[in-house]
Image (cartoon, rainbow, N blue to C red):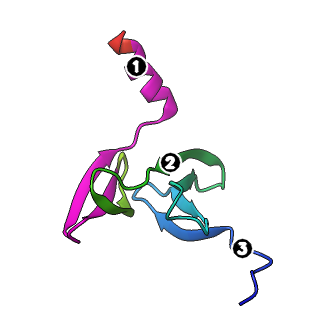
Amino acid sequence: MPHPLVWPAYSELLVDPVGRLWMRAYDASVAVRPAMWFAFDSTGQLLGKLVVPLATDGRRSVSIIAFAQNDVLLRTLDADDALHLQVVPLLSALSAGKRNDERR
């Protein structure tokens, strides 16, 4: 089979409760690289980026189920194909920097 000349720009779109559009960048090598998600406001302005790391610690896969206002719902499968759900807070780079400064 010939190698495609073009690839899609994105592989998934989700909208969160506050109206942000989350776009997962297409990556043909998704099994070996973290998933990249980009958030846009209602005017199309880029708000930020989210990197979903590869599965580790015996986890076989990690995927996003939904976005909330300040959280993301992750689904993971472990080595035995058991399903696990996890809610992870979304932190902006600015708020993460403030939290790191507070720890010092």
Rendering quarter of residue 54:
bottom left
Q: Residue at x 28, y 50 (%)?
A: 57
- Give yes or no for contact between labels 3 and 1 (Cβ–Cβ under 8 Å): no
Crowding near the residue tagged with mark 3, few <14, some 14–19, many ≥20 C-alpha atoms within 10 Å: few
Rendering quarter of residue 77:
bottom left
**In the rendered structure, does residue 79 fall within the stretch colored magenta?**
yes
Q: Which residues are magenta?
A: 72-101
Position in image of residue 70 (x %, y %): 36, 45
Which amino acid type corresponds to the residue marked 1 in the rendered image? Asn
Q: Which residue is mark 1?
A: 100
Instruction: Identify the image quadrant of the N terminus.
Output: bottom right
Q: CA distance from mark 2 to mark 1?
A: 18 Å
Q: Which residue is mark 3?
A: 7
Q: Which residue is mark 2?
A: 50
Instruction: Determine whether the residue tagged by mark 3 lies in a helix, strand or loop.
Output: loop
Q: Nearer the viewer, mark 3 or mark 1?
A: 3
Instruction: Determine whether the residue tagged by mark 1 lies in a helix, strand or loop.
Output: helix
- Give yes or no for contact between labels 2 and 1 (Cβ–Cβ under 8 Å): no
Position in image of residue 36 (x %, y %): 55, 54
Q: CA distance from mark 2 to mark 3?
A: 21 Å
Q: Is residue 91 left or right of residue 21?
A: left
Which amino acid type corresponds to the residue marked 3 in the rendered image? Trp
N-terminal label among 2 and 3: 3
Relative vertical location of residue 1 with respect to residue 94 in this rendering, above or below: below
Position in image of residue 19 (x %, y %): 48, 58
Q: Is residue 83 left or right of residue 96?
A: left
